[in-house]
Image: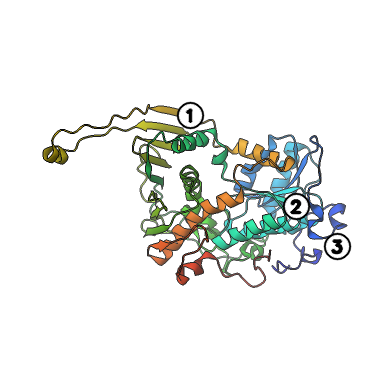
Amino acid sequence: MTGTSSGWTRRGFVGTLGAVTAAAASSAAQPLWAGAIAARNANDKIRLGLIGAGSRGNQLLDAFFARDDVIWTAVADVDDHHAEETAARIKDRTGLTDVATMRDYRAMLDGDTVDAVVIATPDHWHAQPTIHACQAGKDVYVEKPVAHNVKEGQAMIAAGQKYNRRIAVGTQQRSSENFQKAVQAVQSGALGKVFWVQTWNFENISPTGMGVDSDTDPPPHVDYDRWLGPAPLRPFNRNRFHLLFRWFFDYAGGMMSDWGVHLNDIVLWALEKDGPVTVSCHGGILTTEDDRDTPDTMQVVYTFDSGEVLTYSMRKGNGLKFNGKSYGILFCGTDGSLMLDRDGHQIIPDQTILPYGIKLVKGDRPTRTITLEASEFKAKDDGLPDHIDNFLACLRDRDTPLAADIVTIHRSTNTTHLGNIAYKLGRTLHYDPKTETFPGDDQANALLGRSYRKGWELPEV
């Protein structure tokens, strides 16, 4: 197949490994929305298709397996081994005998064999299947970050709105009681005026990291041209492929978008912000000697319209934990602080002091008494089980709000794109979160999207 996204025909489905059902075959001439979910009885099973059957795809499968109202009908992956092994897992766990496998995900969309799709592909393959699924009348659960760049996220939102589809994003922390209670504490004013927030990821993989690998021919069981899709044509290299793709700007955004999106998402939620108004970044590849082109060291500083400061810190060359944590979020307010990660959160009261210099000049002055009480909450999980339940509930009752809808998480994802754009340009950027542009800055605005390989352009919405 060519990568054209405009020709929605069955001629393009070369590479399909397993036949789709007769129902799908008979629907080729039907309009794109013919496969929309019909009103269904509460006892009917929701039919899902998996797009991207690698590490994260199978982690999500494990979470969905616990739900007896789900049936998996199809698996798509450009790696035949991934598709076949995952289909075998589904059959083994569920007793199903007919799970279609394919290289081209569009085969599962062309008909009425799936109600919704779960997308766990590399970042550069989030937008196209999401848009195609919406056009085919399917709802979507797509992994974070929402998209490879800002404009792709905007196109995904437009597709969901135009075709009236629900698009959930895999930022499962939003479904965790731990994070919900932490956000409530910040928003309640219990910490006083929250003016400074720190998010971070620290570990030491220096100096070798993932190492240096030579280019080779792609494995025969992989459709490498399709794996590249919209990304630039480059020789196959194992360091740019499964799992490790995230350390290359062609396909992802490094640690900034891989983990930073989880952390910054909670900050925007707690501060009730759509995005920052300025962003700057310092760092680079300072401690690893491997093939990556994304930084191993970053200090990103964001400011918001009412003055709050958010700093995202990332280093791969030193693993000293910050307050005992290798990653996390720290909200600092005038009455206290809140330390948060997936294990739980702590509220830590502060106290005011009279500095030596002020006392010498002004004499004894009364200090404010802070009445905030210390507390601690232990998390049961990272929120994924409840996140899955929320997605399935929204498929059954379309009035149920998504815990992590694409519009909201697109804004959170944008903070990571902004950090990377500031890194690439090496200067402070001024951003308008309402228009999602850098006013008057053509150089920065050019980096809100990407150039596409011919034949793999973004579908028109």
Which residue occupies the foreground of this view, 440 or 392?
440
Q: Tag 1 or tag 2, which sits nearer the N-term?
A: 2
Q: Does residue 252 appear in the picture of this structure?
A: yes
Q: Residue at x 33, y 38 (%)?
A: 334
Of the two numbered discs 2 and 1 in the rendering, the one whose residue sits closer to the viewer: 1
Residue 411: x, y in percent?
Answer: 53, 53
Which residue occupies the foreground of this view, 60 or 96?
60
Residue wearing tag 2: 101
CB of mark 1 within 8 Å of CB of mark 3? no
Considering the numbered disc 2 on the image, is that residue within a helix, a strand or a loop?
Answer: strand
Considering the numbered disc 3 on the image, is that residue within a helix, a strand or a loop?
Answer: loop
Of the two numbered discs 3 and 2 in the rendering, the one whose residue sits closer to the viewer: 3
**Disc 2 residue type (three-letter):** Thr
Residue wearing tag 1: 378
Residue wearing tag 3: 29
Residue 279: x, y in percent?
Answer: 41, 58
Q: Tag 3 or tag 1, which sits nearer the N-term?
A: 3
**Disc 3 residue type (three-letter):** Ala
What is the crowding at mark 3: few (fewer than 14 residues within 10 Å), some, or many (at least 20)? few
Q: Does residue 294 appear in the picture of this structure?
A: no
- Please state the total of marks drawn on the protein image: 3
Residue 323: x, y in percent?
Answer: 35, 37
Residue 241: x, y in percent?
Answer: 57, 58
